[in-house]
């Protein structure tokens, strides 16, 4: 920074418009005195907590899975959470000073250097976080909606999105990082000399537009797949609701693009860019929710199924003595379902399937009979899913669940009516 006159550095960053007076001690916003610090603190804490909880549910569901399976999408999620933490910290520093939604004529020119530096870093963290999030979401959906990696529309659509998002976000990172020569001119508004061949405002608008298109495609992709599955309308609706969180991410992307366009007509950058930052917080948080919320039912069932878990204990106490006093067939059925004492019952005693409501993550044997559509789009009633090595061709869109059963003993009925168990030959 050149040796500038202190009086020049202490002047307002931009001239105050007619009817306004610069106030450095208590910057004035459209809503209150002193800048909007409280709103920023609340948004940072809320978004950080939601992102952390969503990531925790996702990782927990993978660890609880038998066998445990940690894929590349989970490592990308952890990387996204780390980058998001850096973005939150920079937002917190901006919230401390000058604050969010503070007009630029209410801060001194010397203070714009620190603000621009933090804004530049936050923009880099934002792009890298979004890259890791979108890659994690797309890879996860590829495994969910196309587990056998068939070369169908879903396979190629997701792969095209993976390649395009990777190229776009990496290119945007380097363009923003090195758009000026020397690099210091990128973030230092007081730097004299150098050049910036790439206009920052135009880059932000193009970035927001391409990001919005990507969000919109990712929002529609699971809905398009789910509503083509051979499920009941109730289950289709329940499954689709797990993925509509992307609507909020798309809405945040639209708002972010609108405020980015305002930079073409206004020089009040502290007000506009902090507004963009708030919408960016919502957009990134929505990405964590998109990949984390569908894991909540899995974690709940895993915890509930463990006899020593808090959820199982609470549910048992709420049922009271009904479970203990329910004898006969119902009591024995529950005994078999729990997995204890099954060796003392004959093979023909099979508890009836539970009639309680289930979501798309609870597809059981009964659902498998009508899940796979035939080549004419009608329900193909099959007794079991085909073996991967069989010649049966799977439909293009299907949710598949493999169940393996190992028989260790079998009953034998004698003429006197007694039943004994023996090892199979």
Image (cartoon, rainbow, N blue to C red):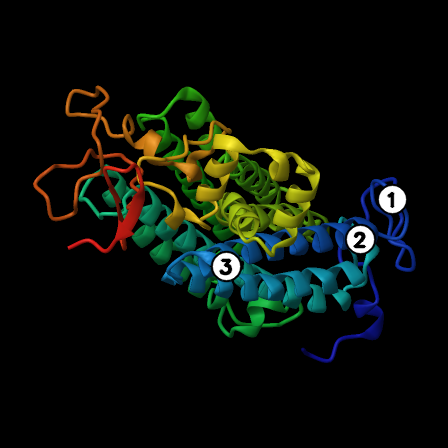
Q: Nearer the viewer, mark 3 or mark 1?
A: 3
| Residue 84 found in image quarter | bottom right
Image location of residue 296, percent across then percent down: 54, 46
Q: How far apart are the two marked residues, 2 and 1, measured between alpha carbons?
A: 9 Å
**Mark 3 — residue?**
59
Q: Nearer the viewer, mark 2 or mark 3?
A: 3
SS of the residue under disc 1:
loop
Using residue 254 as the reference point, say whether residue 394 is left or right of it: left
At x 19%, y 44%, the residue is 150
C-beta proximity under 8 Å, tags 2 and 1: yes
Q: Residue furthest front?
A: 416
Image location of residue 315, percent across then percent down: 65, 42
Mark number, residue 20: 1
Viewer-proximal residue among 383 and 61? 383
Quarter the C terminus occupies: bottom left
Viewer-proximal residue among 63 and 322? 322
SS of the residue under disc 2:
helix
| Above or below 34: residue 419 | above
| Above or below 355: residue 271 | below
Quarter the N terminus occupies: bottom right
Within 10 angstroms of label 1, few (less than 14), some, or many (20 or more) residues? few
**Mark 2 — residue?**
105
């Amino acid at each position: 920074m050149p040796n500038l006159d202190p009086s020049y550095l202490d002047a307002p960053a931009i001239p105050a418009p007619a009817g306004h007076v610069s106030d450095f001690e208590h910057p004035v916003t459209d809503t209150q005195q002193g800048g909007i610090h409280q709103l920023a603190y609340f948004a940072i804490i809320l978004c950080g907590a939601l992102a952390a909880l969503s990531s925790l549910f996702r990782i927990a569901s993978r660890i609880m899975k038998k066998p445990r399976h940690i894929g590349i999408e989970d490592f990308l999620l952890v990387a996204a959470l780390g980058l998001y933490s850096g973005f939150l910290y920079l937002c917190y520093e901006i919230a401390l000073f000058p604050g969010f939604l503070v007009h630029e004529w209410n801060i001194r020119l010397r203070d714009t250097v620190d603000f621009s530096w933090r804004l530049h870093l936050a923009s880099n963290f934002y792009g890298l976080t979004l890259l890791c999030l979108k890659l994690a979401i797309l890879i996860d959906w590829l495994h969910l909606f196309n587990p056998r990696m068939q070369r169908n529309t879903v396979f190629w659509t997701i792969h095209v999105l993976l390649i395009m998002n990777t190229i776009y976000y990496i290119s945007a990172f380097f363009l923003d990082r090195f758009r000026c020569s020397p690099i210091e001119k990128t973030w230092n508004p007081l730097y004299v000399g150098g050049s910036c061949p790439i206009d920052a405002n135009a880059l932000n608008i193009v970035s927001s537009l391409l990001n919005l298109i990507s969000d919109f495609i990712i929002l529609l992709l699971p809905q398009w797949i789910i509503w083509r599955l051979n499920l009941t309308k109730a289950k289709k609706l329940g499954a689709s609701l797990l993925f509509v969180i992307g609507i909020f991410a798309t809405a945040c992307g639209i708002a972010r693009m609108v405020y980015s366009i305002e930079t073409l007509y206004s020089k009040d950058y502290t007000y506009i860019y902090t507004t963009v930052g708030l919408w960016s917080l919502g957009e990134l948080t929505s990405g964590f929710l998109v990949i984390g919320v569908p894991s909540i039912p899995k974690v709940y069932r895993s915890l509930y199924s463990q006899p020593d878990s808090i959820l199982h204990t609470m549910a048992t106490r709420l049922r009271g003595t009904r479970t203990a006093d329910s004898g006969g067939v119902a009591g024995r059925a529950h005994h078999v379902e729990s997995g204890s004492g099954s060796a003392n019952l004959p093979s023909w005693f099979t508890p009836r399937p539970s009639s309680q409501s289930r979501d798309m993550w609870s597809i059981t044997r009964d659902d498998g009979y009508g899940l796979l559509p035939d080549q004419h789009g009608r329900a193909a009633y099959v007794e079991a899913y085909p073996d991967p090595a069989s010649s049966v061709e799977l439909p293009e869109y299907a949710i598949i669940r493999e169940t393996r059963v190992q028989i260790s003993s079998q009953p034998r009925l004698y003429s006197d009516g007694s039943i004994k168990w023996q090892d199979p030959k």
